[in-house]
């Protein structure tokens, strides 16, 4: 497992002013404030040139195969509360908001990426998604990857590899292309480059006085991987901020490790609450954070498809049983990022993350010996004040230690 390339920097809250001077935000940070319009411009331009758009809905889907088929993989996960009422015409009210929001875009036909998609590659991770896909597939071309749930079982890994190979056939048939070793290797190199850059960006947060906030870091996640301009801006940000430190007040904030469900674009409310309450999200272990970045694919592996399948099968998601890799990952991240507390975010209706929360609580309090908070919420802002009070109480506990 490659580690983050950036070395931690040290800086105490009583450091000389020359150590913690304000870091000018590079122009490249501003580029990502318009992430969705840039993605839309890119997708439309590629689409017009005949490159198919393929929607994906989970980090288990190997983007490399979609690139190797000459298509553009776009994340379709919904982060808007506005589309949920339309979804609830068909779906249970108590279902996870991420599923409902995604489905709401589908019924409203209001996600331009989804409307452009020639194919959706889905996966049977949680029950809610799996059943929602059946409804969505009535109107859109879809392939569902069958994901075995026992990560420690060799036959499960072998079955997953079969599913990955089946996806190759599906893509080749659907788009009339051949996924050659050469094309796959190029795609692996592209995704390794992106993962490497995003690891370096994440590692900036190891500093005692990081040059970014957690919210700024989250904003750097693009809905489309491999956009050349995004990669250039990642490089510019790393170059500009490596070894730099942020405003001195950041050194006094409570360092938070966030775990749990993904915080998809549009639904970053909990990070805002944490950082407006005196915290600093130094690391997100979830799928919109470092989880998908922790492992690369060896481009020189003798069997590239097998190596690709293995990388994706290692993802520590709560739909796995057991999911011990999640706690192992949290152990390493808590140490690397010097977390002072853990916040476990769960979308209402997400049973796997909700049940697994008991393990995270025990792990944080008994093994790591740091305070922990469970936040169960949905896409409605109605509980923002209540969450803020609980987060502030958590930080009070941290400060009293
Ligand atoms: S949390 Fe699990 S199901 Fe959700 S995107 Fe990540 S890997 Fe997929
Ligand atoms: S957050 Fe949970 S319930 Fe929602 S889509 Fe992801 S795994 Fe499924």
Image (cartoon, rainbow, N blue to C red):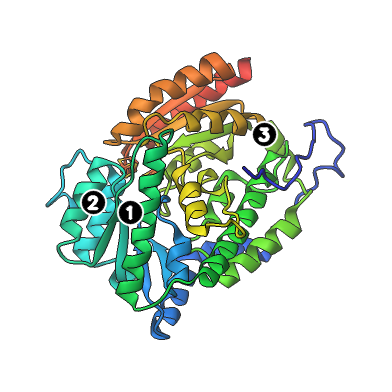
Q: Is residue 171 left or right of residue 312?
A: left
Q: Residue furthest bottom?
A: 49
Q: Quadrant of residue 11?
A: top right
Report the front residue among 142 and 47: 142
| Label 3 vs 2, first from the N-terminus | 2
Q: Quadrant of residue 281?
A: top right
Vertical side of 154 occupied by 358: above or below:
above
Q: SS of the residue at dot 3?
A: helix
From mark 1 to mark 3, how far is it between C-alphas?
Answer: 33 Å
Q: Nearer the viewer, mark 1 or mark 3?
A: 3
Which of the image's four quarters has the C terminus?
Answer: top right
Report the front residue among 225 and 222: 225
Q: Nearer the viewer, mark 3 or mark 2?
A: 3
Vertical side of 39 occupied by 216: above or below:
above
Vertical side of 393 occupied by 257: above or below:
below
Q: Residue at x 33, y 60 (%)?
A: 166
Q: Residue at x 52, y 16 (%)?
A: 365
Mark 2 lies on residue: 84
Mark 1 lies on residue: 80
| Mark 2 Cα shell of 10 Å, populated few (<14), some (14-19), many (≥20) | many
Horizontal and vertical percent for residue 376? 35, 31
Q: SS of the residue at dot 2?
A: helix
Vertical side of 265 occupied by 393: above or below:
above
| Mark 1 Cα shell of 10 Å, populated few (<14), some (14-19), many (≥20) | many
From mark 2 to mark 1, how far is it between C-alphas?
Answer: 8 Å
Image disc number at residue 336: 3
């Amino acid at each position: 497992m490659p580690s983050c390339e950036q070395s931690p920097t040290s800086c105490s809250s009583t450091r000389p002013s020359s150590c913690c001077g304000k870091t000018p935000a590079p122009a490249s940070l501003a580029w990502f404030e318009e992430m969705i319009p840039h993605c839309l411009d890119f997708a439309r331009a590629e689409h017009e040139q005949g490159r198919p758009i393929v929607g994906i809905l989970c980090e288990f889907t190997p983007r490399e195969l979609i690139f190797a088929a000459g298509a553009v993989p776009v994340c379709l996960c919904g982060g808007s509360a506005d589309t949920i009422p339309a979804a609830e015409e068909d779906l249970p009210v108590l279902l996870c908001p991420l599923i409902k929001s995604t489905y709401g875009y589908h019924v409203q036909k209001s996600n331009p990426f989804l409307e452009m998609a020639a194919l959706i590659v889905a996966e049977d991770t949680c029950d809610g998604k799996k059943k929602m896909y059946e409804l969505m597939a009535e109107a859109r071309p879809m392939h569902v990857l069958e994901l075995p749930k026992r990560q420690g079982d060799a036959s499960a890994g072998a079955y997953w590899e079969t599913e990955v190979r089946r996806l190759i056939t599906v893509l080749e048939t659907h788009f009339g292309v051949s996924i050659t070793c050469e094309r796959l290797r190029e795609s692996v190199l592209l995704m390794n480059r992106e993962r490497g850059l995003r690891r370096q960006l994440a590692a900036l947060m190891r500093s005692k006085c990081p040059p970014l906030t957690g919210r700024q870091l989250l904003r750097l996640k693009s809905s489309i991987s491999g956009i050349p301009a995004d990669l250039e801006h990642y490089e510019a940000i790393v170059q500009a901020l490596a070894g730099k430190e942020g405003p001195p007040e950041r050194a006094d904030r409570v360092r938070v490790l966030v775990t749990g469900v993904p915080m998809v674009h549009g639904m970053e409310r909990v990070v805002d609450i944490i950082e407006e309450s005196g915290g600093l999200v130094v690391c997100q272990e979830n799928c919109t954070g470092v989880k998908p970045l922790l492992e690369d694919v060896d481009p020189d592996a003798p069997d590239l498809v097998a190596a690709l399948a293995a990388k994706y099968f290692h993802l520590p998601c709560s739909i796995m049983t057991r999911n011990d890799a999640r706690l192992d990952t949290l152990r390493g991240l808590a140490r690397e990022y010097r977390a002072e507390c853990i916040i476990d975010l769960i979308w209402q209706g997400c049973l796997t993350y909700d049940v697994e929360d008991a393990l995270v609580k025990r792990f944080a309090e008994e093994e790591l010996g740091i305070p922990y908070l469970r936040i169960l919420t949905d896409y409605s802002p109605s509980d923002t004040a209540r969450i803020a009070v609980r987060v502030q109480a958590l930080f009070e506990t941290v400060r009293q230690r």
